Image: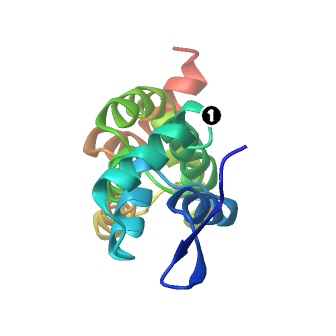
Amino acid sequence: MSRTFEVIEGGATPSVQARAVRLLAQREHSRQALQDKLRTEGVAPEAVTDALDRLQARGLVNDARVAETLVNRRASKWGAARLRQDLQAKGVSPEVVADTMVELKATELARAQGVWAHKFGQRAPDAVTRQRQARFLTSRGFSAEVVRQVVAGLADALDDNGS
């Protein structure tokens, strides 16, 4: 059993590993995010690396799980570009981000249609309204091609024709 407390200057303070576990108990964190948080607490880089290696070996630090959690929470409202930005900001490894983007791009059209239907519900009667709808979807991180298909109603036309 590992020691969870170290005695420093006469008082008991949580070990690096215990601090990391405490942070993980609150919510999922990527390895990079944990590293950044622990280093701001003044912990030596070697101690942080060792502790995170042990936690990762036990499956407690997992970037794929962080990505899955974030995507499950936000995918119904945001496009792939925005989700990529969020994953990168959370410090998720580039490999996990790339794998996640492949999965998200496959469902982007359907997700964009859902966001569009929830916000607008009907096709735009004029060019000004179409532009407003397109700006909204673009600001949510959906690709230009997907936005064009949704706003123009091309995706609905394709579904109606069975193509």
The part of the image, by quadrant, that contains residue 17 is bottom right
Q: Is residue 98 above or below residue 111?
A: above
The part of the image, by quadrant, that contains residue 159 is top right
- Mark 1 lies on residue: 58
Pick whichever, 94 or 130, lies toward us: 94
Furthest toward the right, the residue is 1
Query: Dot 1: few (<14), some (14–19), or many (≥20) neighbours within 10 Å?
Result: few
Q: Would residue 98 be seen by someone viewing this image from the given angle?
A: yes
Q: Is residue 21 left or right of residue 38?
A: right
Q: Is residue 33 above or below residue 145?
A: below
Q: Is residue 133 left or right of residue 112?
A: left
The N terminus sits in image quarter: top right
Pick whichever, 132 or 110, lies toward us: 110
Percent x, y for residue 80? 39, 44
Q: Would residue 110 be seen by someone viewing this image from the given angle?
A: no
User: Element at badge 1?
Assistant: loop
Q: Which amino acid type is shown beneath numbered disc 1?
A: Arg
Percent x, y for residue 157? 50, 31
Pick whichever, 107 or 42, lies toward us: 42
Q: Is residue 38 left or right of residue 23?
A: left
The part of the image, by quadrant, that contains residue 85 is bottom left
Percent x, y for residue 135? 31, 65
What count of labels does the image hold? Answer: 1
Percent x, y for residue 21? 63, 58
Pick whichever, 146 or 29, lies toward us: 29
> Which residue is pictured at 29% across the width and 57% down the height?
45
Q: What colour scheme governs how the chains and residues are painted in the rendered image of this protein?
A: rainbow
Q: Is residue 32 above or below residue 110?
A: below
Furthest toward the bottom, the residue is 10
> Which residue is pictured at 34% across the width and 31% down the height?
98
> Which residue is pictured at 43% across the width and 48% down the height?
31
